[in-house]
Image: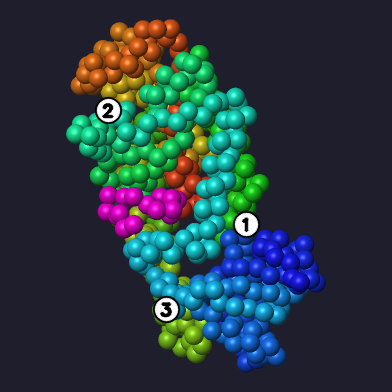
Amino acid sequence: MSNETVIGQLAAFEGREVSLKGWVCGRRSGGKIVFLLVRDGTGVCQCVAEATRPDVFGAAGAAALESSVELSGIVRADTRSAGGYEIALTAMRIIGAADDYPITRKAHGVDFLMSNRHLWLRSSRQTAILRIRHTIIRACRTFFDEQGFTLVDTPILTPGAGEDAQTLFPVDFYGDRVFLSQTGQLYLESACMALRKVYCFGPTFRAEKSKTRRHLSEFWMIEPEIAFAGLPEVMELAEGLVTAIVRAVLASNEADLRAVGRDPEPLRRVEPPFDRITYTEAGEMLRRPATAEKMEAELAGDRQKLQAMIDELPAIEKELREAKKEAQKDRAQERLHDLRENIRELEADIAVRPEHIRLAQSFQWGKDLGGSDETIISRSFEKPVFVTHYPREAKAFYMKAAPDGRTVFNMDLLAPEGYGEIIGGSQREDNLDALIGRMKECGLDPAAYNWYLDLRRYGSVPHGGFGLGIERTLCWICGLKHVREAIPFARMMSRMDM
């Protein structure tokens, strides 16, 4: 009797008969033999059906892409096969046929793939990204558990703004107008006065009309809050968390990183301490002539790279025209599609770069850092970099004012390689009168936050925290071009398919 197992455990059954269930993710035939690639969520293996077993050979030949199957066979080592093992089939049946599966080996555009996201998730690239996402989340929870934090679930429905009131999603709540949560922070501040070190993890919502590669309308954020802490302690915690995340991914998912085209070597440099610069220093960096010269040189290099890519097109187009076999055509078509998409993306990037250089050179103190500013700054560091002490008028009402009266005790953590902000945090204003004054400056009614002000009336202490965006962190770690691939089902200004 065969042993029921999964592909990820085949090494333990070499030379023995096993049975497993999965989905066909590839098929090719050559005369009296059919090769199936089967995946089951734990791995991929090659399964071989020979004409000497007509029932198995017929079932293998009829198994269309993404059909679900149950099979049995002898496990044998084969270094050429995915995972290092293959199965010589002795029995097979199709559980659920998948005729005319819409996502084929031919190249598809991003819009088509996003519209078929429920099926695109089955691809090897997407499953690798999801596994890395899982590791990131597990690493966050493990880190906070080991640091003595308590998980506190905060509301998704809230009566008012936690961040910018202009980015609230309104919801009808039994006739009252409430909003989807922008952050769990205000509630965590209450919980940290009871438990000292707390965190929440869940979806957050921003009605931000932005179509950049970094923005989602719904995203997941993990937020710690600690009592008896100032900005230095908050930054130390953030540094430790990001280091733990990267170490966990390198330990568990190096093969997945390579599967999505990510060179893991830059991630190995992510070790404490991270560099720290002030907002004022960041502004000076943006305006520095040497920065413009460096960006102009990078732009010239990218223009040369673009031309080289354009020059490569005719050869691949010729290869596609002259391909004799379907597999050759598919490979050429995929290469051509990828090249054209890379050309479009690089052309778009090059088109906006001169404006980014101009904005950097004319940067004025008092503005918040924009996405292009963060890209320029983060490309100047090999590791994540903290930017601290932003102007108070550019930041939220709850951030504690610095003694200079112009800045606040806050920080953003920018991921390297141009990925920008992955963490935003601060020391919170713990003085009642100062907080009420700041609320009024921001046009907020203190009466609507009476419960929040109670935290300053009854046993107030210095405290602080931050929020880490899971999707932006995953984008950086995987080297993704757009945040839409970093979440199973993206919610964006222009997309709500399912």
Quadrant of image for the N terminus: bottom right
CA distance for labels 3 and 2:
49 Å
Quadrant of image for the C terminus: bottom left
Question: N-terminal of the two: label 3 or label 2?
Answer: 3
Question: Residue at label 3?
Answer: 100
CA distance for labels 2 and 1:
45 Å
The answer to whether residue 228 is seen in the rendering is yes
- Note whether 417 is above or below 305 in the view shown: above
Number of marks in the image? 3
- Report crowding for label 1: few under 14, some 14 to 19, many 20 or more residues within 10 A (C-alpha): some
Question: Residue at label 2?
Answer: 159
Callout 2 secondary element: loop
Q: Amino acid at mark 3?
A: Asp
Q: Nearer the viewer, residue 178 or 224?
A: 178
Question: N-terminal of the two: label 2 or label 1?
Answer: 2
- Quadrant housing residue 305: bottom left
- Report crowding for label 3: few under 14, some 14 to 19, many 20 or more residues within 10 A (C-alpha): few
Q: Please report the bounds of the magenta region as a residue range.
A: 482-498
The answer to whether residue 293 is seen in the rendering is no
- Residue 133, given in percent of the width and then of the height, sits at 52, 48
Question: Residue at label 1?
Answer: 255
- Quadrant housing residue 89: bottom right
Query: Residue drawn at (38%, 13%), measured in percent from left and top?
Result: 455
